[in-house]
Image: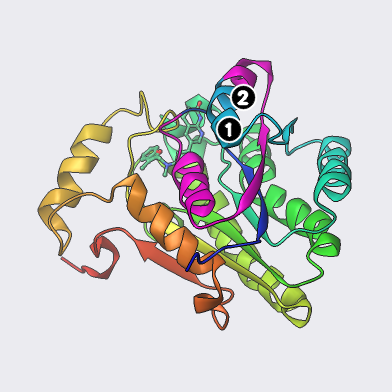
């Protein structure tokens, strides 16, 4: 029995084969969902076409800079035309200017703060609002967060504040959309070696820290994010909304 048979979904945030969005998309597709994809910028177009093309030549692949209202509107117009309705949405999008992730949080510029929140948090609100009218049979909206939203992770800086906003937005969206049977949750993932993590100084030490301190004594693997993402999208999670689920090998429970 396929958990997501007949479900129609859209995935934001695939950059390459290592993307968390790609791991969750593959799991959703393996569970029977039909998916559309968006990409950000000409640079990632080919990557996404090559990956998503594996689901068939007719796979809907659309450009979307989530900070542009007209592009967001265009995506959901196209999805409405192609699918007629929608059940699943994955938001796996984040960005803060590089220098904001290097120095001290206290030095975050107004512009870096604005960009981080616009791309990484407000975009969930914009996508949820645009998706809701298509989710006529109910739906599941899923975002990606990180522990730096609730505790200080050195250098995560303004991204931690933006993820806190994403998590709070998840709760307010869950409240607003609950009466339409649309659930909104996020996965707080342990560190994963993706394009977004590449070049972050101290990232390999962070992976070692999770191995040493997490109850499971290892790091999370992308397939496990796919499995949890499939659960949250499925009717097995029909009574779960507004939650942050830790998929971090237990790291978050530790006090010392
Ligand atoms: O959410 C993230 C990373 C998101 C991210 C990554 C970059 C790198 C390139 C957002 N913006 C940018 N901007 C860039 O220019 N993670 C959970 C991964 C991550 O990033 C960190 C981490 C971890 C973990 C940054 C500092 C410290 C820890």
Residue 78 visible in the displayed image: yes
**Gap between marks 2 and 1, in whole Å?**
5 Å
Indicate left or right for 104 with 201 as reference. right
Q: Position of residue 184 (x, y in %)?
A: 62, 68
The span shown in magenta is 17-46
User: Element type at marker 2?
Assistant: helix
Indicate left or right for 12 with 101 as reference. right
Indicate left or right for 40 with 98 as reference. right
Q: Position of residue 16 (x, y in %)?
A: 48, 27
| Within-10-Å neighbours for mark 1: few <14, some 14–19, many 20+ | many
Please give the name of the residue rendered at 48% of the width and 45% of the height, measured from the top-left corner.
Answer: 26
Q: Quadrant of ligand 1?
A: top left
Q: Position of residue 21 (x, y in %)?
A: 51, 43
Residue 236's place in the image compared with 222, above or below, is below
Using the image as rendered, state which of residue 225 and residue 251 is in the foreground: 225
**Which residue was labeled with disc 1?**
52
Mark 2–mark 1 contact, CB under 8 Å? yes
């Amino acid at each position: 029995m396929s958990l997501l048979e007949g479900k129609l979904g859209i995935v934001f945030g695939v950059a390459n084969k290592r993307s968390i969005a790609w791991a969750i998309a593959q799991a959703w597709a393996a569970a029977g969902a039909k998916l559309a994809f968006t990409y950000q910028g000409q640079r990632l177009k080919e990557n996404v076409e090559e990956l998503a093309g594996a689901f068939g030549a007719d796979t809907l692949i659309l450009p979307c800079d989530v900070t542009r209202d007209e592009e967001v509107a265009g995506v959901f117009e196209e999805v409405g035309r192609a699918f007629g309705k929608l059940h699943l949405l994955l938001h796996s999008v984040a960005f803060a200017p590089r220098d904001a992730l290097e120095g001290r949080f206290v030095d975050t510029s107004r512009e870096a703060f604005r960009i981080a929140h616009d791309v990484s948090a407000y975009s969930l609100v914009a996508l949820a609002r645009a998706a809701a009218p298509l989710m006529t049979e109910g739906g599941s909206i899923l975002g990606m967060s990180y522990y730096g939203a609730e505790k200080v992770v050195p250098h995560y800086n303004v991204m931690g504040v933006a993820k806190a906003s994403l998590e709070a937005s998840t709760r307010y969206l869950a409240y607003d959309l609950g009466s339409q049977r649309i659930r909104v949750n996020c996965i707080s993932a342990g560190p994963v070696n993706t394009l977004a993590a590449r070049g972050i100084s101290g990232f390999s030490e962070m992976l070692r820290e999770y191995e040493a301190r997490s109850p499971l004594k290892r790091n999370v693997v992308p397939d496990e994010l796919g499995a949890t993402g499939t659960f949250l999208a499925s009717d097995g999670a029909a009574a779960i909304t507004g939650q942050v689920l830790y998929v971090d090998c237990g790291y978050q429970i530790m006090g010392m």
